Amino acid sequence: MTKPLRGIRVLDLTNVLAGPFACHQLAHMGADVIKVETRQGGDLARQLGADPELNKRLMGVSFLAQNPGKRSITIDFKHPAGKDVFRKLVRTADVLVENFRPGVMRRLGLGYEDLLKENPKLIYCAISGFGQEGPLKDLPAYDQIIQGMSGVMNITGAPENAPYRVGYPMADTIGGMTAAFAVASALADKARTSGTFIDVSMLEAVMATMGWAVSNYLVAGREPQPMGNENVTASPSGTFRTSDGLLNIAANKQEQFEAVCRVVGRPELTEDVRFAERQGRLQHRFELKAILEEAMSSKSTDDWWKLLNQAGVPAGPVYTVPQALEHPQIADRGMVGAFENVPGVGRDVRLVRTGFKFNGEAPAVEAPPPVLGQHSEEILADLGYSAEEISVLRETRAI
């Protein structure tokens, strides 16, 4: 498969999710991602996940998910010799990604301006909760904090139970995806002759994805409200109960609404003054929903799914995660990669890759997630350190 980032070296100094997810994308595009970790414990994600035994081994599921294809070296940034090792490593790199609080790297003498002296063309990407400037820049921020402060939680859930958090760390993930895009953009600048500092604010990254919700307020003055599984722009569009479960329907166009009415055996609804036009359907959405659910109680979700799609109406079942993974649409497209007998884990591991293909192939990495410090000697040897010098660095705990 084409590896557009082949030959690019990325230093991944990040922890837990936003930064590791960013570098996870870059690794799948062919970058040589070196995960620079602390000597004691490494990435906190090594201790997180649903398998307590793996957490004890510092190979937690949360770590495994975002770190295949990377190499791991441990360095003590507070040790003078450790700093020297890191500076040498920076000279060989194209990109550095970190998600410490603003100012931490600078206080260590390893900030952007310091590292430009080692590598004048370095792309330095700093990911933080609120960005490198502003009144909140020094505050800690985790996914749920960002979900709450961005407004996401306020519009998630139904009116009677909101605010609700999204059921996975979406703010971390969006922050990581934004960082990966920014890094790839900087790398694509053929005219670049100097360093680039990328400041990724998770709060801003999340709000950038809230286009309709934010713009309805900025442009139309309408404050977004929680609507559960209903679509704010169309009706019937949302989740509908069938004889055995739930079905999502997105009848966003007039012809799709009319098709729904025909399929469920209620064609007269298209002439009902409450529902004939889009605005009327929005005002009477719950009356329309009740009528449609009564009609849909006669067949299963799978039956209605097939009939509606045949009629040109977007629809789909509400799956669990295992059901989604088992479906041929996911299982047969290379979305899930497998690694055999992973070191530190002691068994085979299956992990999701990226969400796209290049020339018909799903991007993949060859190596499983690394054991803490697994590649330290290999990387140091590449930097020119002798076996004796590496031994001294270990003995003095610089690495």
Image (tube, grey):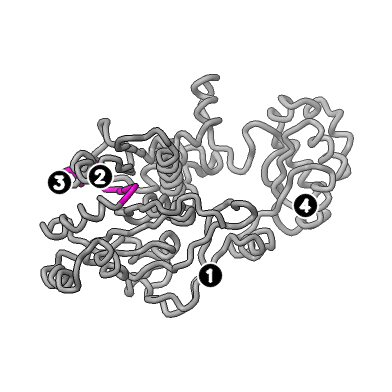
SS at circle 3: loop
> In the rendered structure, which segment of residues is drawn in magenta?
93-108
Residue 62 seen in render: yes
Q: CA distance from mark 3 to mark 2?
A: 15 Å
Q: Is residue 67 left or right of 231 when viewed as pictured?
A: left
Q: CA distance from mark 4 to mark 1?
A: 32 Å
| Mark 3 / mark 2, whichever is N-terminal | 3
Q: CA distance from mark 4 to mark 2?
A: 56 Å
Q: Position of residue 214 (x, y in %)?
A: 50, 29
Disc ID at residue 119: 2
Q: Position of residue 246 (x, y in %)?
A: 69, 53
Judge by depth and name the residue closer to the eye, 87 or 67.
87
Residue 104 seen in render: no
Disc ID at residue 338: 1
The quadrant of the image that shows the C terminus is: bottom left
Residue 73 in which image quadrant: bottom left
Disc ID at residue 109: 3
Judge by depth and name the residue closer to the eye, 65 or 242.
65
